[in-house]
Image (spheres, rainbow, N blue to C red):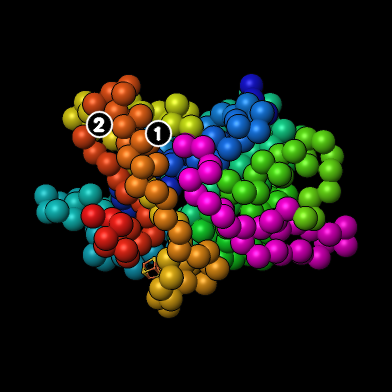
Amino acid sequence: MADILLIQPPVRDFYLTRKRTIPYGLSSIAAVLIQNGFSVELFDSLATHKSRILDYPDEMNHLRLFYGKPDQSPFALFHHFRHFGYSYEHIGKAAGQSNAFLVGISSLFSAYQDEALKTAEIVKKWHPDCKIVIGGHHATSMPEEVMKNPAVDFLIRGEGEVSMPLLAKAVHDHLSIKDIPGIVYREENSSLVITPPAVMSSLDHYPLPATHLIKKKYYQRNKSGSIAVVASRGCPMKCSYCSMGESGLPYRRRSVESVVKEIELATVSEPVRFIDFEDENLSLDKKWFL
Ligand code: SF4
């Protein structure tokens, strides 16, 4: 049971890079929600070794020609198209059991947008009384597309650390949501209101991620801990193929002291041998980085 449930959806693909799926962003949002007095659960659909083979999606049928049968080559692992993580039914039941009044679902990559929307649909089925909000890079870039799905009540553009506590309070206390930074919602006449992405003004003023909500054992490598860290946000470049260029999120850095403190705290509970920096552009400022 929790006030708010945050969900990392499963992934359907030929492969999964497990060491890069630590739900750092959700744990960062969870920390701010906890600071604001809400209880939070984090359901990481990918924190399991379960996967099952699926039929190729229609748009990938042409790949059968190349991946027709398993072999011993380095490409053998791409033979099957799979559902990685817990089943949608399992996720839906967990959402119902949480009894959360607000469920947040991450939608980071456009290639996995269907998984985020299917997660929203199954949560609505098993827990129809909750409100569902979707956030992440894909949601920020394509709000109209995501909001076509009636299971999604709200969408947050930009950094959820800013918007989620305000949205949680508004939903809990039945207040207006229209002034929440980054919020996307439907008016009574079904027209869409889309606001600019929310931006964290001073990264050091936010709490460190609530990493106690992460299933650390699953992310261990060779029996040692693995952690993710984000030392900066945004990117000033405008690469045409990358959603960051159009996101409107400015480049900001944390202080070196804050980053080191986070790493030191992570190593108190277990030896850590793998640190995954998930910054958009970690080495942009080489002097700060080194
Ligand atoms: S994050 Fe990387 S790919 Fe994206 S705009 Fe910045 S430099 Fe380009």
What residue is drawn where x is 35% and y is 29%? 265
Q: Nearer the viewer, residue 13 or 8?
A: 8
Can the viewer see residue 119 in this picture? no
Q: Are marks 2 and 1 in contact (CB under 8 Å)?
A: no
Q: Which mark is residue 47?
A: 1
Q: Measuring 77% from the left and 55% from the top, which residue is drawn there?
A: 179
Quadrant location of the N terminus in the rendered image: top right
Relative to 8, say whether 190 is above or below.
Answer: below
Dot 1 amino acid type: Ala
Q: Nearer the viewer, mark 2 or mark 1?
A: 2
Q: Is residue 247 magenta?
A: no
Instruction: Tell me the SS state at disc 2.
Output: strand
Tally of numbered tags = 2
Q: In the image, 200: left or right of 258? A: right
Say which quarter of the image contains residue 285.
Answer: bottom left
Please state the extent of the stretch shown in magenta in the rendering. 180-209
Residue shown at 30% from the left, 45% from the top: 276
Q: Which residue is mark 2?
A: 272
